[in-house]
Structures are given as structure tokens and as C-alpha cells.
């Protein structure tokens, strides 16, 4: 090999070594994540190794940005005691199936469906309002209507019972991950026990407020659960759902078609909302890109082609372990790094952070810089410098023989 060729090869090898050993520049972000001003304070960069461990400030930094609870202070009343009478109990909606019995009278005794206009229509009687009303209220109106129509001299014995609650369409907006109109309560007959299909009565849980919020992606960590707004028939109600995260009965009211739900925001990240609940997202759909060493492919690493489901409340380092980015031979695989790509659900601005895996595992204040994962986040893993150099050497070895 000539001297010129040796110099060229040496230059290439030098460039490869520099590329393999040199650290990548820190990701640039619009949000002030380095000072704790990102959506989560956990996004800020940890101090360099060797410095004194930082105090656990992330939860405090997050809380400092919170606006006051719209429904009152934390010590105030929470839950079902705040629910107004108009929202309590079972309320009928359009397309609900009801069983009506009037003494032993076969003329009026039958099953009826609440009409699209919200009325219950029995033969020979004026329509009776049913939308948003309880069966007790309908029983009283029906008995009075039978007397007014002179079918009875005195109010007969009347029974009105819900046989099947239909699905309802409601709108959910505000501090939820997927604000849009949702349909809840639909259930096929195959999912019901045959005995339940024949029984009189129906369950309301599938039409509750919590079901609608989960159908809209669940509440975001910045949600103000003390002042959830429910608008129905021109009236607005404020509901306190904080009890859901405290294991107490909350204002989980039954919804009707046409209801509008708005979850306000406190403009801050609340660490206490990052745990499973009836209002939380069912999980996190995470996009992953695994390292090439030591695994030879994502299929072998049991990573799906597009996304992977993880429980709500999962942290960045847990996902890094789950994606096979941690472990292996210490000499060649210890000093890897991982990148998190996320998006602020309030502003829509993306944020990229990078962590040295080995440093994150060994520092005492690791929790303060370990972000919670949000729906749609993406993680990419990078191999260690030793593995990078090995790859560079392999590329150079394959190129040298073809040099003329």
C-alpha cells in the first residue's frame, strides 16, 4: 500500500474514532427544560457526576406553577356530597328501553323506547317527558295522565323500570389526551349473561362520567379535577372528582346523550395524578427504537413493529429497561444513552431529552430526573462508544480491500 493510501486510510480511521468517541451535542428545545420549565420538571438535565446529589425538587417545581383549584381548596368537600339533585341516581336518555306496567291493564303495559325527542309515548296518552328524568318522576306523571284522560277515576298502580340503558353520545374537551365526541355504554348481547338479558333492570356504570373521560384518552396530569364542568340541557354543573384518586366515592354521575364535559387545566404537572385510576389513561402507547447491539433486531428483542403498551405511571428508565437498552457486557455495553421524544399536551411543542443510562442508574437523585411517560412518547437507544468503535472498525475493514 502506498504512503498516500496509508494517509487516506489513517484519516478515515481518525475520523471514525472521533465520531465513535465524541459525545453528541445536547438536544435543543424551545421549552426551558434545563431550568425546570418544561411540562415536567423531571425533563431538566441532571448535574454532572461527582457533584453532591440534588434534593428531590421536581414535585415542588411542578407544583409552583399550579393555579388554584377551581373547585375550592384541597381541604374542602370532595365527591358525591357536591352533586346536585338533578344529577343523582338513574336518569333516562334517548333510546333507553323501559318496562311500563299499569295495574293489570294490557293496553298500557308493555316495553317502550324513549323517543329521539326524549319523550315516552304510550298509546292514547300525550307524550311524557323522559330525557334526564328518573323513573319515579315518570311514574307520577303517567299516573296523573291516566286520570286526566279519564281511563281511571283514581291514580292506578304504575311501575316504570329501566330494562336496558342505550349508549349515549357526549362531548369531552379540556385537559384530556384525546378531546372529542365519544359514544359510551354500548354493549353487545354476547357480552351479557343470558340471565341478565332476561332480568328486569340495567346497570349504569358504562354510562358514567368516568367512562366518558377514559374514552377521551383519560385526564392529563395538568387536569383540575376539583372543577369538572358538565353542561346539560342549558345548565352547567361543577363536579369534584378528586376523591377518585383518594379511594373514595366521587361524583361519577350518569350521563345522557347531548351532555358536554369540560376538564379544566391547572397549567402544571401534578405528580399525584400519575397513578392508575378510573379517570387515568388505560396505559401508554410508546414508540420504541431498540439498539442494534447486542440484539440483532427488534423482533428478537420482543419489541413490536410500531408501538408497545406500558402501564400508566411508567417512568423513562423503566421503559429503557423494558426495551432491552440496559445490561450486557460492562466493558462494551455499559455506557449507553437513551433519548426521549415527547410533546407538551398543553402547548403541542415537542421536547427531546437525553440521558446517560449508566449515570442515571448510579446517581442517588435519579428519581428527580426520571420523567413519567405520556401517550405517544418515543424512545431511542444508542450503543456505547466501544460498540460504536467496533462498528466503525468493521466498516473500515470492509472498505480497505476494495481500495485499488
Image (cartoon, grey):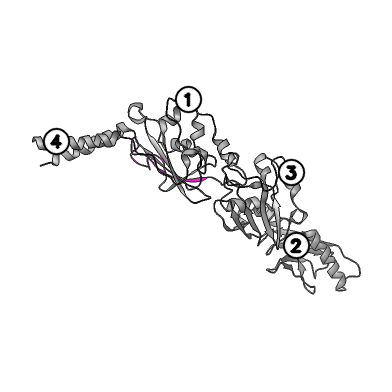
Residue at x 77% of width, y 68% of height: 128
Residue 164 to residue 351: above or below: below
Q: Secondary structure at mark 1?
A: loop
Q: Which mark is residue 52?
A: 1
Q: Are marks 2 and 1 in contact (CB under 8 Å)?
A: no
Residue that badge 4 annotates: 7
Q: Nearer the viewer, mark 3 or mark 2?
A: 3
Q: Quadrant of the N terminus?
A: top left
Rate crowding at label 3 as few (under 14), some (14 to 19) or many (20 or more) other CA atoms within 10 Å. Answer: some
- Disc nearer the start of the sequence (1/4): 4
> Residue 264 at x, y = what percent?
62, 51
Residue that badge 2 annotates: 99
Is residue 253 visible from the viewing direction of this image? no
Q: CA distance from mark 3 to mark 2?
A: 38 Å
Residue that badge 3 annotates: 77
Q: Which mark is residue 281?
A: none
- Disc nearer the start of the sequence (1/3): 1
Q: Quadrant of the C terminus?
A: top left
Q: CA distance from mark 2 to mark 4?
A: 93 Å
Q: Nearer the viewer, residue 147 or 193?
A: 147
Figure quadrant of residue 341 = top left
Residue at x 74% of width, y 51% of height: 83
Amino acid at each position: 500500500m502506498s504512503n498516500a493510501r496509508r494517509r487516506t486510510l489513517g484519516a478515515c480511521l481518525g475520523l471514525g474514532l472521533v465520531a465513535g468517541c465524541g459525545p453528541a451535542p445536547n438536544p435543543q428545545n424551545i421549552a426551558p427544560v434545563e431550568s425546570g420549565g418544561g411540562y415536567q420538571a423531571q425533563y431538566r438535565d441532571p448535574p454532572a457526576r461527582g457533584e453532591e446529589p440534588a434534593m428531590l425538587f421536581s414535585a415542588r417545581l411542578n407544583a409552583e406553577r399550579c393555579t388554584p383549584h377551581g373547585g375550592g381548596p384541597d381541604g374542602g368537600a370532595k365527591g358525591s356530597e357536591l352533586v346536585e339533585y338533578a344529577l343523582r341516581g338513574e336518569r333516562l336518555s334517548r333510546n333507553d328501553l323501559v318496562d311500563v306496567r299499569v295495574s293489570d291493564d294490557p293496553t298500557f303495559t308493555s316495553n317502550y323506547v324513549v323517543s329521539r325527542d326524549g319523550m315516552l309515548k304510550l298509546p292514547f296518552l300525550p307524550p311524557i317527558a323522559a330525557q334526564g328524568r328518573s323513573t319515579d318522576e315518570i311514574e307520577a306523571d303517567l299516573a296523573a295522565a291516566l286520570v286526566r284522560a279519564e281511563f281511571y277515576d283514581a291514580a292506578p298502580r304504575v311501575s316504570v323500570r329501566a330494562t336496558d340503558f342505550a349508549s349515549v353520545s357526549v362531548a369531552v374537551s379540556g385537559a384530556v389526551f384525546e378531546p372529542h365526541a365519544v359514544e359510551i355504554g354500548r354493549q353487545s348481547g354476547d357480552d351479557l349473561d343470558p340471565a341478565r338479558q332476561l332480568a328486569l333492570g340495567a346497570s349504569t356504570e358504562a354510562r358514567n362520567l368516568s367512562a366518558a373521560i377514559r374514552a377521551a384518552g383519560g385526564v392529563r396530569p395538568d387536569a383540575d379535577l376539583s372543577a369538572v364542568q358538565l353542561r346539560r340541557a342549558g345548565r352547567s354543573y361543577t363536579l369534584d372528582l378528586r376523591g377518585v384518586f383518594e379511594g373514595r366515592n366521587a361524583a361519577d354521575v350518569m350521563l345522557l346523550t347531548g351532555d358536554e364535559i369540560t376538564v379544566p387545566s391547572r397549567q402544571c404537572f401534578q405528580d399525584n395524578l400519575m397513578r392508575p385510576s378510573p379517570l387515568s389513561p388505560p396505559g401508554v402507547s410508546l414508540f420504541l427504537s431498540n439498539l442494534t447491539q447486542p440484539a440483532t433486531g427488534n423482533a428478537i428483542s420482543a419489541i413490536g413493529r410500531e408501538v408497545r403498551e406500558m402501564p400508566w405511571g411508567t417512568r423513562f428508565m423503566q421503559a429503557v429497561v423494558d426495551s432491552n437498552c440496559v445490561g450486557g457486557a460492562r466493558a462494551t455495553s455499559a455506557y449507553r444513552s437513551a433519548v426521549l421524544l415527547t410533546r407538551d399536551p398543553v402547548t403541542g411543542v415537542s421536547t427531546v431529552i437525553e440521558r446517560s443510562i449508566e449515570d442515571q442508574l448510579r446517581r442517588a437523585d435519579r428519581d428527580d430526573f426520571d420523567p413519567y411517560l405520556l401517550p405517544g412518547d418515543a424512545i431511542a437507544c444508542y450503543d456505547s462508544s466501544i460498540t460504536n468503535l467496533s462498528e466503525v472498525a468493521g466498516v473500515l475493514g470492509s472498505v480497505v480491500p476494495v481500495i485499488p
